[in-house]
Image: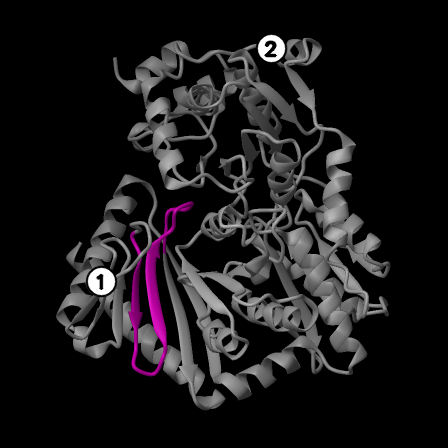
Amino acid sequence: MGDYERWLKKVTDPALRAELLSMSPTEKEDAFYKDLEFGTGGLRGLLGAGSNRMNVYTVAKISQGIADYLKKNYEKGSVAISYDSRINSTLFAQTAARVYAANGLSVHIFRELMPTPVLSFAVRYLHSSMGVMVTASHNPKEYNGYKVYNAAGCQITLEAAEEISNFINKNDLFDDVKLINFDDGVKKGLIKFIGEDCFEAFMDYIQTKRIPEITSRDLKIVYSPLNGTGLRSVTTALSRAGFSHFTVVPEQRDPDGTFRTCPKPNPELKEALSLGLALLEKQQADLLLVTDPDCDRVGTALIHKGAVRLINGNEMGILLYDFLLRHKKAYPGSVVVKTVVTSDLIFPLAQANQMKVVEVLTGFKYIGEQIGLLERKGEEKLFFFGFEESYGYLTGTAVRDKDAVDASVVIAQMFEEYKDRGFDPVDRLEEIYAQYGYVETGLDNYEFKGEEGSLTMLSIMKSFRIEGEKNRKNYAFVNDYLIGKSFAGKKETTLDLPASDVLKFGYPDGSTVTVRPSGTEPKLKIYYYVTAKKEARLASRHAELKKITEGILNAALEVK
């Protein structure tokens, strides 16, 4: 019996059965051609029926595999669970709790939706063996996901993911999953709700980021949680940090998994900020803060010299590092952690301040992992700052994932400091460029859906690898993170990072182009880091690099 026929026979949920019965042959193929892949970030996928979809059956199977892993590795395992505002997030979180409780694990779950950073904090606060965050982060409404955290509050390592995957693959999602009734689990004390004390402890931690020497707090802020989890956490944190002049975008205030006002609830996208930008201009406010649905990313904008100016993730990372240098204690040997696709401008800045830059693969889990490595050596205090170009920042160690609550408070204080001094962060950014070199960054996304799309991306990556081999003389270096090698002319060195399908091309002028398939969406991502001695040269240099890169891409598509 094929997977589709078996699902049709086994599934009793009316909505999923109706979807199965209405599927076209193409839809059947896409829903069943593979199982959702479990990795270091957990898993993420489209909502719907099928083994390649997020639904109660796939969530239960994954939870059973994790329960088996915990029972093997812990005498008394425990799990902390949180969830965002997405469609079925509450259902999936309760389904996971039912599975864990049925397997004899201690389960703690939030009564209300809570951000990803609060879940990371809760794992450590409750001394849980593992954490689960039901979210698809910034993806469109059609998606949901399941992030898994280790006992340190960091997304699980590659080794743990592989071991969990083996347990998941041993189980049949219809026959091998243990479940209890959620309400019965609560009544019997097998499932407990996380108390208000955890949230208060998180807020106390955030208040350690308050900078006393910045005394005025009259900044006018517009804030949008994009109908996600950020409302309570961000507004509470800002209020307790002394910021009372803020307005929440009314249409995006309350949780709503359909994201009617922003179909792509991603603070990297200008269209997701449109309502906030309109309110920023109307109120002539000083700062717009926008957090994504699980409140781990934060986007910003301001009115600079009379015009709206968005600050991208690379720019904000540089600005925050520069700001923290003045207000956070740096110990000898302090480190800054960034991903391979994030601005290289941090290298000369860190060098000028006697700090080390640690570069990791894409994914904030690798930044959180670096804190753990320092912690094991008794050097946790050496973590100074971590950031990634996709609007993720971390200034402390009590949370081991990107934290938009922390970042919102620090960003507001930075804006306040510059306002008190009569200029704004963009002015400061220009000063940094004048000192260290002009930089422009960009990201292009190319969407390739379904099984055919996955094969197309593999073909494109192969073409870029051929380019790197044939025309190596055109580049200062070519880094192939899949094979762990860096090539510079005839010289070959080893990259001390886990294998990942990423290629980075370095040019003699310091510019780079990085190509990788997304790990969470059916997209190929191309990152541009453009440098120039004169600001006026940036746009044309960016266009040159894009023409070269698109030439390789288009040639690959023609061959395909």
Near-viewer residue (280 or 153): 153
Quadrant of the rendered image containing residue 25: top left
Q: Residue at x 56, y 53 (%)?
A: 380
Image mark for residue 464: 1
Q: Which residues are magenta?
A: 501-524
Q: Residues within 10 Å of mark 2 (few under 14, many from 20)?
A: some
Residue at disc 1, secondary structure: helix
Image mark for residue 323: none
Can residue 342 be seen in this snapshot? no
Label 2: which residue?
181
Q: Position of residue 349 (x, y in %)?
A: 52, 76
Three-letter code for the amino acid on which mark 1 is drawn: Phe
Can residue 287 be seen in this snapshot? yes
Three-letter code for the amino acid on which mark 2 is drawn: Asn
Mark before the other along the chain sequence, 1 or 2: 2
Q: Position of residue 511 (x, y in %)?
A: 36, 77
Q: Residue at x 32, y 19 (%)?
A: 170
Q: Residue at x 54, y 35 (%)?
A: 151
Quadrant of the drawing holding the C terminus: bottom left
